[in-house]
Amino acid sequence: MPASILNLFFPRNCPVCLNPSDRPDRYICSDCLNRVPLLPPEHDFPAAMHFEGCGRELIHAFKFRQHLFLLEDLTDLLEAAALSCYHVPAVDLVIPMPIPFYRRFLRGYNQSELLARSLAKRISRTCRSDILLRCGFPRQQALLGDRERALNVKGTFRVRDRSRGWLKSRTVLLVDDIRTTGATCDEAVKTLKAAGAARVLPLFLAKAGD
Ligand SMILES: [Zn+2]
């Protein structure tokens, strides 16, 4: 059935302004897309946007309100950031940042895993969510100071023993939704490298703070 007829029955409304989207196969309308606080192209921080305004609204809708239909829209942003920050052909494997199992259980999904899978498909790479595992019960990072955050995440991750072969001398793209202080990401990078990864390239959908 042509997309225009499908849209009559299933209109794609923009989650930010609630008007019908004017972009084929996408939900965020052009006006709202122009308001997404993208990081400037010359910025070398590996994130698509700032975690504020319209960017924050989109991530909250995707992460906390089950607006999973935003996946392709958000993958567009993530893919653009990957291409501008990294030499993507060098990537061997895409790995999502794991979240604590109870949070995944309550939410029903890991938002970073959905993003990582979608991006991996676009760049024709394998995505594995069963290599880097999260263990323990860390306290919420947002409630802690810098030093406490680093201590809080120590030993948070482990690599599944039988998956080490996947990492040996490989370049890994590590996908996470929001970067706060970076303590969690640093610990994940350290764990992957200790397990044999040659390079770990972190990639975030959004960057919180300055
Ligand atoms: Zn809109």
Image (cartoon, rainbow, N blue to C red):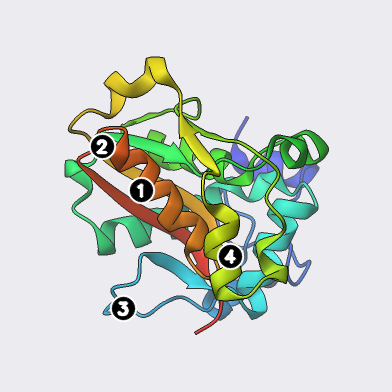
Q: Nearer the viewer, mark 4 or mark 2?
A: 4
The residue singled out by tag 3 in the image is: 43
| Tag 4–tag 3 contact (CB < 8 Å) | no
| Tag 1–tag 4 contact (CB < 8 Å) | no
The kind of residue on which mark 4 rests is Arg
Dot 1 or dot 4, earlier in sequence: 4
**Which quadrant does ligand 1 occupy?**
bottom right
**Rendering coords of residue 1 (x, y %):** 63, 29
The kind of residue on which mark 1 rests is Lys
- Tell me: is circle 3 under 8 Å from ligand 1: no
**Rendering coords of residue 8 (x, y %):** 76, 46
- Tell me: is circle 1 under 8 Å from ligand 1: no
Q: Nearer the viewer, residue 122 or 116?
A: 116
Dot 4 or dot 2, earlier in sequence: 4
Q: Tell me the CA gap for discs 2 and 3.
A: 26 Å
Q: Taking the image as drawn, is residue 178 in sight? A: no
Image quadrant assignment for residue 90: top left
Secondary-structure class at tag 4: helix
| Tag 2–tag 3 contact (CB < 8 Å) | no
- Residue at the (37%, 37%) spot, across then down: 94
The residue singled out by tag 1 in the image is: 190
The kind of residue on which mark 3 rests is His
The residue singled out by tag 2 in the image is: 197
Q: Taking the image as drawn, is residue 70 in sight? A: yes
Q: Nearer the viewer, mark 1 or mark 3?
A: 1
Dot 2 or dot 3, earlier in sequence: 3
Q: Tell me the CA gap for discs 1 and 3.
A: 24 Å
Dot 1 or dot 3, earlier in sequence: 3
